Amino acid sequence: MSSQSRSEATSGSVRQVALELFANQGYAATGIRQIASAAGLSLSAMYHHFSTKEELLLSIMRTTMTELEEEAARCVLANPDPADALGALVTSHVRMHAEQPQACFVTDTEVRSLFGDARAAIIAQRDSYQAVWVAVVEEGTASGQFHVANPKIAVLGLLEMCTGPARWYRADGPSSIEDICTQFTDMSLRLLGAPLNTTHRKEHA
């Protein structure tokens, strides 16, 4: 393994350790020395990869938001029909929050811990992601598929609902992730006043 590959692997390990600590005890309660110790590094070695605790948090949040943004773009590109696009967005959001609960939980809750440019960067990504959903709901409303008074408020409600699986989904639970995604898609379409049919009930990958 090259020195660059080793460095990248160590950085990834540090991010994972920090993520688990942030998720389990909160960002504010986690110290940089604790992260270094849990990662098996000296403090000086730790600073070689991340100079501050905020840099670590920002790295985690940027990675999570970028994945959400890229998935949302694929959902819209693959589904020109607003109801199909909405179903794909719901499925993508629910699946990621169920399968990566720690990353999503930290990203959703620790914006409060960022300041200045770091905070602005994450809020910009969050707003960009939400804008994709709003555009789909606005298009569906304009075409008569959806019936909502305020697409922006509707999207905030949908995102709040679809974020829930990060808190309670278990792989060994009574419902599969596929079943949960289907149910959340149905609920989302109903909340938007859209008629359900076999096309919109399909699983959106």
Image (cartoon, grey):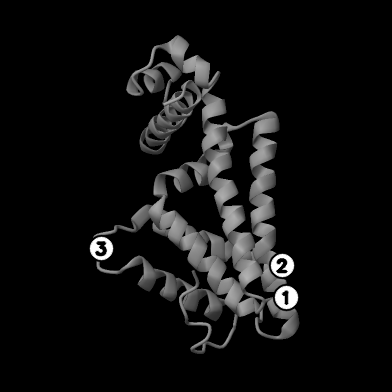
Q: Point out which mark residue 130 bears.
A: none
Residue farthest along the front direction in this orientation: 1
In this view, 106 is above or below 77: above
Q: Position of residue 146 (x, y in %)?
A: 65, 81
Q: In the image, is residue 126 above or below residue 158?
A: above
Q: CA distance from mark 2 to mark 3?
A: 34 Å
The image's mark for residue 173 is 3
Is 121 or 29 nearer to us in this picture? 121
Looking at the picture, how far across and down is residue 50, in whole percent?
53, 22
| Residue 30, picture quadrant | top left
Q: CA distance from mark 1 to mark 3?
A: 36 Å
Which image quadrant for residue 118? Answer: top right
Q: Is residue 132 above or below residue 67?
A: below
Q: Are marks 1 and 3 in contact (CB under 8 Å)?
A: no
Is the Cβ of the residue at disc 2 closer than 8 Å to that at disc 1?
Answer: yes
Q: Quadrant of the N terminus?
A: top left
Residue at coordinates 73% horizontally, 84% vertically from top-left?
143
Q: Sequence order check: which comes first, mark 1 or mark 3?
A: 1
Neighbourhood count class around disc 2 (C-alpha, 10 Å): few under 14, some 14–19, many 20 upward:
some
Left or right of 166? Residue 149 is right
Residue for badge 2: 135
> Label 1 amino acid?
Glu
